[in-house]
Amino acid sequence: MDKKNAQETLKKVLKSRITKHVSLAVAIFLVILLLSQYMLSCITKHGKELEVPDLTNITVSEAVQIAEESGLRVEIGDSVYIRRLGRGLVYSQNPPAGGKVKKGRRIILTINAVSPKKVGVPNLVGFSLRQAKAELQSRGLTLGKLTYVKDIATNNVLKQLWRGRVVEPGTSVETLSRIDLVLGLNPEENSTTIPNVVGLKYLRAVDVVHDYSLNVKRLVFDKGIKDYADSLDAVVYRQVPSGVGESGIAVHANMGDEVTLYLRKEATE
């Protein structure tokens, strides 16, 4: 083999080795990059919030299955008695459907009992509206009408009423009884906005209206709503007044004002 051929052979060998080394380095780099992206994705998803599914108006076993599939847990916290609702079905849940929670969060269920149940009315005087609402829900009672009177502290509970009369703490009433509240209203803090509840289910829509210190004037169900179970699945498709003005800006109202909700089985796009 002459000198020229030997040099060419050496160049080919070196070129081949360099090519292999470069290819190996690129492959290792790609593997490291893919592993890094995978690990980053796992770390990011670890703290990801999940949307709470709607577990109302179904059996507890169905609720458990849906919750587990969503990465959540359920626990029966209380029961109420509703003659028009199927026995053992889930009446309400906390947190409500649509809320954002961490993986593994417990969803507390209130189910419909087999027979009537009574509870004692809590002492809500001095509570804020938010505190009173939470206390009523924990007892299986329903927040009724909000009446505002002039006072130094807005949304401070001054009186609690049942069937139009002041009700003493500890009075035994059936679960889901409506407890009306008389609340304070500072003239300088009497404004609120009307929430847009179109697309929300019946109970959740009412809940949101109360959160904004407003009352539900009337519930108008379409003819397709045959019974109470249907009403729990009914969705708001219209509200008066609307929650958004013509310019897309939120509509303002006075605390205690009323909103009428129109509901049907399914929301129409």
Image (tube, rainbow, N blue to C red):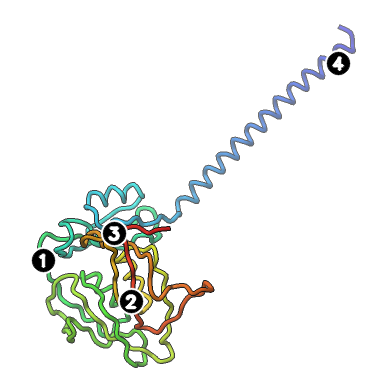
Among the two numbered marks 4 and 3 on one chain, the one whose residue lies closer to the N terminus: 4
User: Where is residue 51, by image quadrant?
Assistant: bottom left
Q: In the image, 235: left or right of 167?
A: right
Q: CA distance from mark 1 to mark 3?
A: 23 Å
Q: Earlier in the sequence, mark 1 or mark 3?
A: 1
Q: Which residue is mark 1?
A: 116
Q: Are marks 3 and 2 in contact (CB under 8 Å)?
A: no
Q: CA distance from mark 4 to mark 1?
A: 100 Å
Tell me the tag on residue 233. 3
Residue in the foreground of this view, choosing between 145 and 108: 145
Taking the view exactly as shown, the residue that stands out farthest to the left is: 115
Q: Nearer the viewer, mark 4 or mark 1?
A: 1
Horizontal placement of 75 versus 27: left or right? left
Viewport quadrant of the N terminus:
top right
Q: Secondary structure at mark 4?
A: helix
Q: Quadrant of residue 96?
A: bottom left
Whether residue 95 is visible, yes or no, is no
* Callout 2 amino acid: Arg
Q: On the rendered structure, is 38 left or right of 138?
A: right
Marking on residue 130: 2
Q: Amino acid at mark 3?
A: Asp
Q: Residue at x 13, y 75 (%)?
A: 173
- Which type of secondary structure does the marked residue at label 1 adopt? loop
Which of discs 1 and 2 lies nearer the camera? The answer is 1
Q: CA distance from mark 4 to mark 3?
A: 84 Å
Q: How many marks?
A: 4
Comes first in the chain, label 3 or label 2: 2
- Residue at image position (29%, 56%) is 55
Quote the CA–CA distance across marks 4 and 2: 88 Å
Residue on which the image places disc 4: 7
